[in-house]
Amino acid sequence: VIASAATRAGFDALWAELSPVGRDPRTGGYRRFAWTRADAELREWFVATATVRGMQVEVDRNGNQWAWWGTPGPGAVVTGSHLDSVPGGGAFDGPLGIVTAFLAVDHLRASGVVPARPLAIVNFIEEEGGRYGIACLGSRLMVGAVDPATALALRDDNGDTLGDTIGVDPRGLGPDPEALARIGAYVELHIEQGRALDREGAGIGVASAIWPHGRWHFCFGGEGNHAGTTRLEDRRDPMLPFAEVVTHVRALAERYGILTTVGRVRVDPNGTNAIPAQVDAWLDARGAEAALVEEAVRELTSHAHAAGSGRGVRIDVQRESWTPAVDFDATLRSRLLLALDAAGTSAPVLPTGAGHDAGILASVVPTSMLFVRNPTGVSHSPEEYADDSDCLAGADALATVLEDLLLRAEAPA
Ligand SMILES: [Zn+2]
């Protein structure tokens, strides 16, 4: 399917409007944190883009924005994504799902589609957790996965709390059963954050699942001392077992077929001429199967203890978080695949290691995701990129599946 000239023109126009907002002209990276000036501009853009289409806009109690085609109500087909970014983020992660949603609505209206149920485009707040540290905060609050008092006390890097900065009444924050009850099905389009589609030579994919993932804190306690006067045999250097853990976890990842990352380290006192007293490191581990991730971390933990005891270094390992696997709704997925197939679009089904609002909603409503090819796989970086033609194919695919869901009289899934 070749995108229409109208879709192409619409994409160019909306993309050009968003491009300068929150962009660092030096690096080309975006900083679009929730409840900042850049975010306010993006939210105004969302309202204007909906209003010019005659779509009614509302803000829910947690600050998520909704634009309605038709009267807000139960059984709605909901699509959308988020407009916020990580620090130094790319242009596509989030905004692509919202821009293509508006284009899909334009296309359906131009084709004379008369929906049998309402449609909403949603912009979830603080999806990246870039400002307050909890990813998918807007959707987590909505489904009751985060305590509102805890959320309001979260602090940004300036020490301001969410309660200080939030753009809606903080007393209303929390579970929103009314907003959830209206969602018949949720379909989120997102740029792929890996290279699976590129390897398969496909422009569009459908998500099967989000991998289970967790974070662990490894603490290595040694003895701080002088780098010039402490003999090697007298040292209790926590850096050494730490280094072993970093290389060993990579080997375990290869053996178990999972992904592990040590991306954050704190060294105390962090001096060039000082043997460290303590090293704290954080492990991120994810994989298709929870049991393999857990087994690898167990093995790593005993390896760490062995590496530490030989050197007089204390080891303490704490799990800080664990998110079980999300399996997207199989019935809705089949429905999407049938509709895409009928439109001549073949879309491979693939899992992802990245979290999304769709993964939060999946515990409550039938949910699915479309991915758009990312030729380098780079994400959360200014280098993040998708071809125009794939973005347009994404808008077409989204229109195809939304049309299918909108025209059915019975519940979508
Ligand atoms: Zn995203």
Image (cartoon, helix red, strand yellow):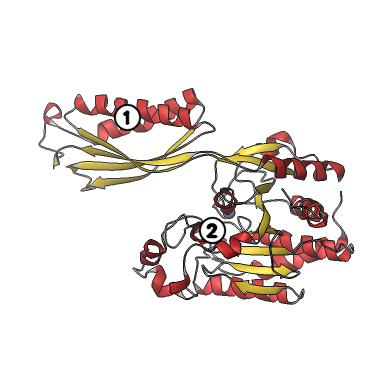
Q: Nearer the viewer, residue 127 or 55?
A: 55
Q: Is residue 83 visible?
A: no
Q: Residues within 10 Å of mark 1 (few under 14, many from 20)?
A: some
Q: Residue at x 41, y 27 (%)?
A: 295
Q: Residues within 10 Å of mark 2 (few under 14, many from 20)?
A: many
Judging from the image, what secondary structure is the residue with disc 1 in?
Answer: helix
Q: Position of residue 370 (x, y in %)?
A: 69, 48
Q: Position of residue 139 (x, y in %)?
A: 54, 58
Q: Nearer the viewer, residue 114 or 214?
A: 114
Q: Is residue 321 found left or right of 224 in the rendered image?
A: right
Q: Quadrant of residue 154?
A: bottom left
Q: Is residue 190 found left or right of 204 in the rendered image?
A: left
Q: Is residue 35 visible?
A: yes
Amino acid residing under circle 2: Ser
Q: Residue at x 71, y 41 (%)?
A: 331
Q: Which residue is mark 1?
A: 301
Residue 139, labelled with which disc? 2
